[in-house]
Image (cartoon, rainbow, N blue to C red):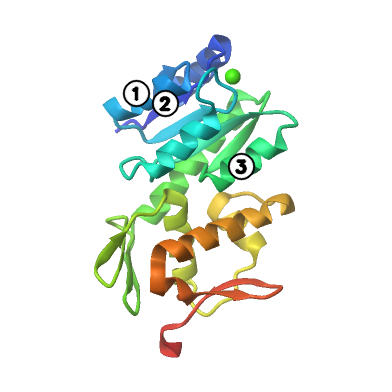
């Protein structure tokens, strides 16, 4: 089945260019010209990915991203932000709000299609395989579900992938750089503090089970091995 993508971009020429290239690559696209229209479209219809421009009239892309992450039905929707050249702060904020990736304008259509495919592939790779379990914390990859003591924890797509990655490598120290690369597919040092932000949020969502994600000072993070419980 074709994947559905919502393109949120107020500049019509850019929206058309993106749509043309994604159509050609085998995706089904809808477009929205404002943050408000984007939220309305998301409420009406299911999408597999959101391409979200930061600079929009009215609600900007960062605010749209924030609202999506607070909506349990949309929290798992992968978002790629479109940011202006030089607006590094937008990229950092976007990633901290849970965007999967960002693309800097001006971009080549080919790069955009590759990034979209990479994000969808990362989603899919978490979506198959098995159940990871550590004490009362259970992560069901196939059903995309995390429970602690039987209580379901709502995680964003990225938090889910992040936890799956840590749980899948118990007892092994994962540096921020490795985590950035494996979870986000990014290798810029600038963004390592983004990892800390996500770990903080993930720990707080997991409650008591959050302590299983250990900080290794100067090295990164490690998921506690079961036999240490
Ligand atoms: Ca714009």
Along the viewing direction, whichever of 17 and 54 lies nearer the viewer: 54
Where is residue 85, by image quadrant?
top right
Q: How far apart are marks 1 and 3 (CA)?
A: 23 Å
Along the viewing direction, whichever of 132 and 45 lies nearer the viewer: 45
The outermost residue toward the right is 86
User: In percent of the image, x 73 and y 54: which residue is there?
Assistant: 189
Which is more N-terminal, label 2 or label 1? 2
Q: Distance between the residues labelled 1 and 2?
A: 11 Å
Which is more N-terminal, label 3 or label 1? 1
Percent x, y for residue 226? 41, 84
Mark 2, Cα crowd under 10 Å, few <14 / some 14-19 / many 20+, is many
User: In percent of the image, x 49 and y 58: which residue is there?
Assistant: 201
Left or right, 120 with respect to 107, comes to left
User: In percent of the image, x 29 and y 57: which residue is there?
Assistant: 142
Q: Name the residue under label 2.
A: 6
Quarter of the figure that contains the C terminus: bottom left
- Secondary structure under badge 3? helix
Mark 3, Cα crowd under 10 Å, few <14 / some 14-19 / many 20+, is some
Q: Name the residue under label 3.
A: 93
- Residue 179 is at least partly visible in this image: yes
User: In percent of the image, x 42 and y 89: which residue is there?
Assistant: 227
- Evaluate if marks 2 and 3 touch, with contact meaning CB atoms under 8 Å apart: no
Q: Mark 1 points at which residue?
A: 40
- Residue 26 is at least partly visible in this image: no
- Secondary structure under badge 2? strand
- Secondary structure under badge 1? helix
């Amino acid at each position: 089945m074709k994947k559905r993508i919502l393109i949120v971009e107020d500049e019509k020429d850019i929206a058309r260019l993106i749509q043309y290239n994604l159509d050609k690559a085998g995706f089904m696209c809808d477009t929205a010209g404002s943050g408000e229209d984007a939220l309305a479209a998301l409420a009406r219809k299911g999408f597999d990915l959101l391409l979200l421009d930061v600079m929009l009239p009215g609600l900007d892309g960062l605010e749209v991203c924030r609202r999506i992450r607070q909506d349990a039905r949309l929290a798992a929707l992968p978002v790629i932000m479109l940011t202006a050249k030089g607006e590094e702060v937008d990229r950092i904020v976007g990633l901290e709000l849970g965007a999967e990736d960002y693309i800097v304008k001006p971009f080549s259509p080919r790069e955009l299609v590759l990034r979209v495919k990479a994000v969808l592939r990362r989603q899919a790779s978490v979506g198959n395989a098995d159940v990871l379990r550590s004490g009362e914390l259970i992560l069901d990859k196939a059903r995309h579900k995390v429970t602690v003591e039987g209580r379901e924890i709502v995680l964003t797509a990225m938090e889910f992938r992040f936890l799956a990655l840590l749980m899948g490598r118990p007892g092994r120290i994962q540096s921020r750089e490795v985590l950035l690369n494996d979870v986000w597919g990014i290798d810029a040092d600038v963004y390592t503090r983004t990892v800390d932000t996500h770990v903080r949020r993930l720990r707080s969502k997991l409650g008591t089970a959050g302590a299983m994600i250990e900080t290794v000072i100067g090295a990164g993070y490690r998921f506690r091995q079961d036999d240490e419980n």
